Amino acid sequence: MTDRVTQRLPQINGSTFIGKGKITELQHLVSKRGSDLVIFDDDLSPVQVRNLERKLDCKIVDRSGLILDIFAARAQTATAKVQVEIAQLNYLLTRLTRQWTHLSRQKGGIGTKGPGETQIETDRRLIGRRVSVLRKRLERIDRQRATQRKSRSDEFRVSLVGYTNAGKSTLMNALSDSHVLTENMLFATLDATTRMVDLGGGQSVLLTDTVGFIRKLPHALIESFKSTLDEVRESDALVHVVDAGHPGLDDTMTVVKQTLKELDCFDKPQLLVFNKVDAVDDPNRLEALRGEYPDSVMVSALRGIGIRDLKRRIVALSAGELVERTIHLPISDARARAKVHELGVVLSEETVPWNAGDGQAEGSAVRIRVRASKRTHEALTRLIDLSELSS
């Protein structure tokens, strides 16, 4: 059984976070329930944690500690484990003082340090070394990911963003026919997963499933998960996935918007998607959402409702980045022609006479009308520059 206690205070108590009366109430509740854990939905200082544990005689976990524990339980890949461990060590570093209180009174005389203080300093050095090793490992991973992103730079990239447990991974599977882990729990996905998605009509995009956002996300996690969040920063557009049945829907949307602003991504083209519409019993709620957000898309990723419409909207989202051009390539350059088909959507292709001028012999070339993103056209231009002909 779980109990919830709240308190409104004009000012936070520096030593215990909550007031004396509320502590007494918690003492009675802990004793009555036989509880061994109290979780605070806010960050506590090491002093506050120590004082509360003494008064309540049970373990105290604050918001950041709980989120870090959840992340540690969810981490599956090497990258996620490194990111979580760095965040955990940075969190622990500020809380070492309360780990050795049983030795703090053992002094060695004036001007000397007691065993407790010596142990704390030793732990700090060990943690610092471990963090340094992990950061170097993460830097190598970041460089590998940067190389991977560079190799995909010619594609139109879309990232799924949203509050945790909004159904992003399920939507990813529905759009790409992949098998990303989906669970009805917080932070089921910690690693960014990227898949090529065929939108029909020769259109395709690179779709990335990202870690879910949450209210008051610990700063240590944002720093540690920088490489994962870089996928959001470097996307061409964002699909904001919202749980249509969430009781705090407006608050979750606000959290996502604020997080995107912190990541300097809020100005990217966005498409609002309300997911889990099949779980909403009140049809008036859906109508109200349609009225308030007329440009949004209603889907159920689990049942495949609205997926076709969503694909059309993503095509429209990318249309502003798509341009058409006609290029000419040597008829013998099969590799260049194959690359054009890979980079864009070929609208027409025909063999035409070619006279390069400057006294060069006449011959034949392939004239290709292609539609591609602006970024892809840069790659096409480089490709043409390398060929024997020019557009």
Image: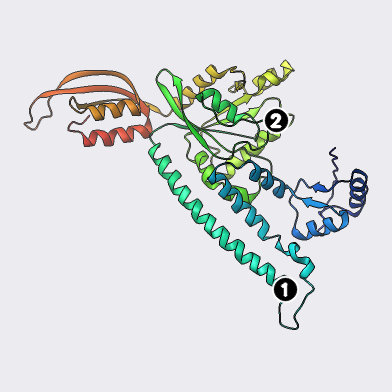
Residue depicted at x 42% and y 29%: 321
From this view, report whether residue 55 is shown above or below residue 369.
below
Q: Quadrant of the C terminus?
A: top left
The percent position of residue 179, horizontal first and vertical second, equals 54, 28
Residue that label 2 marks: 249
Which residue is the extreme one toward the left?
Answer: 359
Residue depicted at x 64% and y 38%: 187
Q: Nearer the viewer, residue 49 or 241?
A: 49
Q: Nearer the viewer, residue 43 or 302?
A: 302
The percent position of residue 58, horizontal first and vertical second, equals 84, 52
Res 291 visible: no
Which residue is the extreme one toward the bottom?
Answer: 110
Residue 279 falls in which quadrant of the image? top right
Name the mark on residue 68: none
Sooner in the amino-acid sequence: mark 1 or mark 2: 1
From this view, report whether residue 11 is shown above or below residue 352.
below
Looking at the image, residue 321 sits to the left or right of residue 124; the answer is left
Res 159 visible: yes
From this view, report whether residue 122 is shown above or below residue 159.
below
1 vs 2, front mark: 1
Q: Nearer the viewer, residue 266 or 123?
A: 123
Numbered disc 1: secondary structure: helix
Residue type (three-letter) at the residue carrying disc 1 = Pro
Residue that label 1 marks: 115
C-alpha gap between disc 1 and disc 2: 52 Å
Residue depicted at x 51% and y 46%: 227
User: Within 10 Å of the Cα at label 1, are there few (<14), some (14-19), or many (20+) other Cα atoms?
Assistant: some
Numbered disc 2: secondary structure: helix
Q: Quadrant of the N terminus?
A: top right
Residue type (three-letter) at the residue carrying disc 2 = Leu
The percent position of residue 277, horizontal first and vertical second, equals 66, 20
User: Within 10 Å of the Cα at label 2, are there few (<14), some (14-19), or many (20+) other Cα atoms?
Assistant: few
